[in-house]
Image (tube, helix red, strand yellow):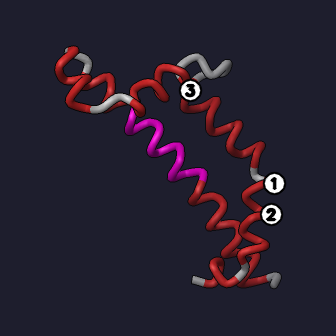
Amino acid sequence: MEFLDHPIALIIVGILSFPVYKTLAKVFFGENYEDLAETIRFVATADWYSLFKGRFWEDWDATMKFNIFIALCFGWVAAVTEILARYVL
């Protein structure tokens, strides 16, 4: 993993990728981030509690949406840093 050999580049790419995070958030949570608060609430709620309340599948859907969003954000930073490490640094 060459991208881990350049931690400073990884941090810089992570900071400069804010517009990408914002665009992904708009895709996942709506243009004005309408679903973000509810998604965070479901992520913070235990699954068994949502099951007890009868909202398990809504919790599961929101948690999966959030996890995919986070994975794409980290994946973007890792991919860009890998390309920079291989061809530029």
Distance from Cα at disc 2 to Cα at disc 3: 26 Å
Residue that carries the numbered disc 2 in the rendered image = 12
Pointer 1 with pointer 2, Cβ within 8 A: yes
Q: Position of residue 65 (x, y in %)?
A: 44, 36
Instruction: From the image, give the main secondary structure of the stretch colored magenta.
Output: helix
Q: Amino acid at mark 2?
A: Ile
Residue that carries the numbered disc 1 in the rendered image = 16
Q: Is residue 19 above or below residue 86?
A: above
Q: Quarter holding the N terminus? A: bottom right
Magenta span: 62-73
* Residue at the image point whose x is 35% and y is 28% from the top: 45
Q: Amino acid at mark 1?
A: Leu
Say which element carries label 3: helix
Q: Position of residue 43 (x, y in %)?
A: 41, 33
* Residue at the image point whose x is 71% and y is 75% from the top: 7
Residue that carries the numbered disc 3 in the rendered image = 29
Please tell me which of labels 2 and 3 falls first in the chain: 2
